[in-house]
Image (spheres, rainbow, N blue to C red):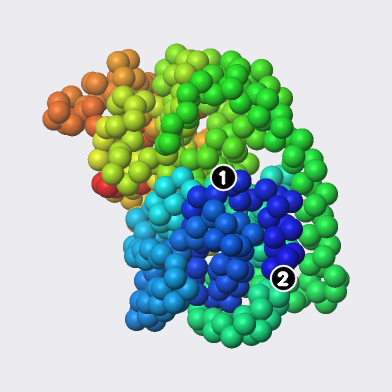
Amino acid sequence: MRDALAAFIDQQRLLPASGGRLVVAVSGGADSLCLLHLLRSLCGPGKRYPTLQLHVAHLNHRLREPVSSQDALAVADLARALGLPVTLGDEDVQALAKREHLSLEEAAREARYRFLRRVAAGDPIAVAHHQDDQVETLVLHWIRGGGIASMNGLQPRQQDIIRPLLIFTRADTLAYCSQHGLTPLEDVSNVDLRYQRNRIRHELLPLLEQLNPNIRATLLRSSEVVQVDAAWIEAQVDQHWSAVVSHEETETIALCRSALLALPLSLQRHLWRRASASLCAGQSPLELRHYTLIEQALSQETGEALMLHLPGQLHFWRQGEQVLLKRVTEEQQPAQIVQNNVELIFPVPGEVAVPGTPWLVRAEFVAEEEEAEILESLRTKGMTQTWHKLASNRYSVYIDRIHLDSVLRVRTRRAGDRIRPLGMAHSKKVQDICVDQHIPRQERDHIPLIFSRAQCIWLGGVCIDDRVRLTGETRHLLHLTMQRV
């Protein structure tokens, strides 16, 4: 395995010719032990890569305490026994998942790469992904949906991450550990079927192998085919990057709207994919619906500011020709990025925190059975006999969604804003409604206004527009809520 690994490293140019430091991510499982042991046999004085120094890094995710802490100590002991420096990290991944609205798998990955990059400080990072991981990743991407980039799979090098074991299988790493007396740590979470990747590994792939015994080789071969097309597309992105991207920082990328819109739609999306990936640890969180939202925001002829909340703590902001994609850290708030009164676009269903206000606005569909019961009551009994079936209050309203689009807009009030309050035949200025309702002056600029494409449909916490009220003709409901954050 060592000679094959060295040949692959040289072929893919995975290691810096000038030497330096290589951070090795070691969980303690068979894959990472195999990687560490092989690299130690190749790196250091008198070896194939004499000027390369290894540095072990291990993150305790605190998901299996006290076992997680014991694993961290075992990795530290192993590194010291091999004469290698080691850095241990600690992250409450469960708390991170809750705080950043991520799945445990997503939070663990996010925490791991943040930690590895802090340790590396710009040096390359070796991780132990192998062919079985590649197959599982391809299936996972296929399930989630995506284009050429998603079926490209794991790459030997992605930015500062290198994957030297991609030519080997899980069986190869287990055999290597057995041959060299290495005892992997057992991680029971690898068989926990609550995690999607484990269900793919233990349930879906065995089923697919019944239909095609060579499914793994088929998927890997398909990925190789896609990689040729993907390489050409990446070359096109390289060619146009400097014309579209006007400024680039660690957490912010500024783009030129006109230069972007001059490109074919496919290339626009690949540029967004690369920009978002560069801000999110090398992996873009964007899906087709997010690209569509961005394209809608770019195509509008308006001088007003527009903002999108995207996955991965990304915020898209546009005013005129100026376009920004920014990753917002935990300490930052949207109001710190752009001025108040900016208009945000968010998908339905979806939610958004409104800059300059303490409010989170959420739009949700109503469960099918509950919706059917409410609609039947509206048709047969009318609203006066149906309202008690709705969990309505000033911060929770139900509206008719037949005339609504797949996105809503939200912002705070501007001069001249109008809404037709429930029960009225004509629209009225928001300012006058606030006065009539005795809303304190200091609160008026912090009230969210939710808009469809045609009009304001909810003056948050005050009134809905009469044109979206529920009637006996209503066929579908939308539940709008606002809560303090």
Horizontal arrangement in the rendering, residue 461 relative to residue 27 (left or right)? left
Q: Residues within 10 Å of mark 2 (few under 14, many from 20)?
A: some
Horizontal arrangement in the rendering, residue 91 relative to residue 56 (left or right)? left
Which mark is drawn over residue 1? 2
Which residue does the image show at 72% across and 57% down from the upper left? Answer: 8
Mark 2–mark 1 Cα distance, whole angstroms, equals 24 Å
Percent x, y of residue 41: 60, 68
Horizontal arrangement in the rendering, residue 181 relative to residue 185 (left or right)? right
Which mark is drawn over residue 18? 1
Percent x, y of residue 140: 65, 60
Q: Nearer the viewer, residue 78 or 144?
A: 78
| Residue that lies at the very extreme toward the front in this rendered image | 46
Percent x, y of residue 333: 30, 38
Under circle 1, the secondary element is loop
Q: Is residue 149 above or below residue 167?
A: above
Which residue does the image show at 71% across and 29% down from the upper left? Answer: 236
